[in-house]
Amino acid sequence: MTADARIKLRNVVSNLCLLAVAGVFIYAAQSKIIEPRQFIIDIKNYRMVPEELLNLMALFLPWVEMVAAVALLIPQTRRAGATLTIGMLCMFIAAVSYAALYKGYNISCGCFGKGSAGAGIKTIALDIGLIIATIIGLLPRRTVSAASQAAMAEFAVAGQQA
């Protein structure tokens, strides 16, 4: 595989990873936006948020997810979107670890609205996978022309040494 082909493949994989993470976050956000009452119940079941903040969190968090997802898709805001995304995923991992694993509550993860899977190891594994995909999506991108220029420069240096 040529250097240009590797760079193209790397850029495609990076873009697909960010597209997948953004898609998951958009789907998750829209399901919570459509059913805020269900999301309030899901948050309440974790027993980590004071009653007074449940409504605010249920209304605010899905829009943060949506903004983060859209930011992942725009090159100029990609790093900010990744920061938000990874931060939320770490928060979700901590919440699931505490409520479902440590406390043993039998709860829905609340990830995708009504009918979400139970919170547990699978939820944490999904979140870790999304973190990894986000990081892969942020790997530095190079253009084919930059790679070609680097190859030509190496060829020129080798020619001078001969």
Image: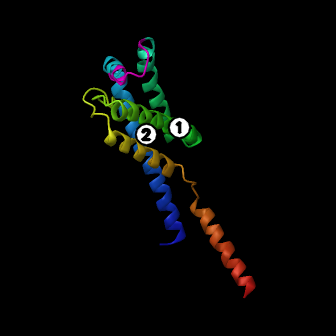
User: Which portion, as a residue range, is magenta?
Assistant: 42-51
Q: Residues within 10 Å of mark 1 (few under 14, many from 20)?
A: many
Residue 151 on image: x %, y %: 63, 72
Q: Which residue is mark 1?
A: 81
Q: Are marks 1 and 2 in contact (CB under 8 Å)?
A: yes
> Would you say residue 70 is visible in this rendering?
no
Nearest to the observer: residue 96 or residue 17: 96
Tell me which amino acid carries mark 1. Answer: Gly
Tell me which amino acid carries mark 2. Answer: Ala
Residue 130 on image: x %, y %: 42, 44
Of the numbered discs 1 and 2, the one sitting upstream in the chain is: 2
Give the residue displayed 52% in from the left and 62% down from the top: 7
Residue at the far left: name it: 115
Q: Main secondary structure of the magenta part?
A: helix
Q: Which residue is mark 2?
A: 22
In space, the residues marked 1 and 2 are separated at their CA atoms by 9 Å
- Number of numbered discs visible in the structure rendering: 2
In the rendered view, tell whether residue 64 sits above or below residue 23. above
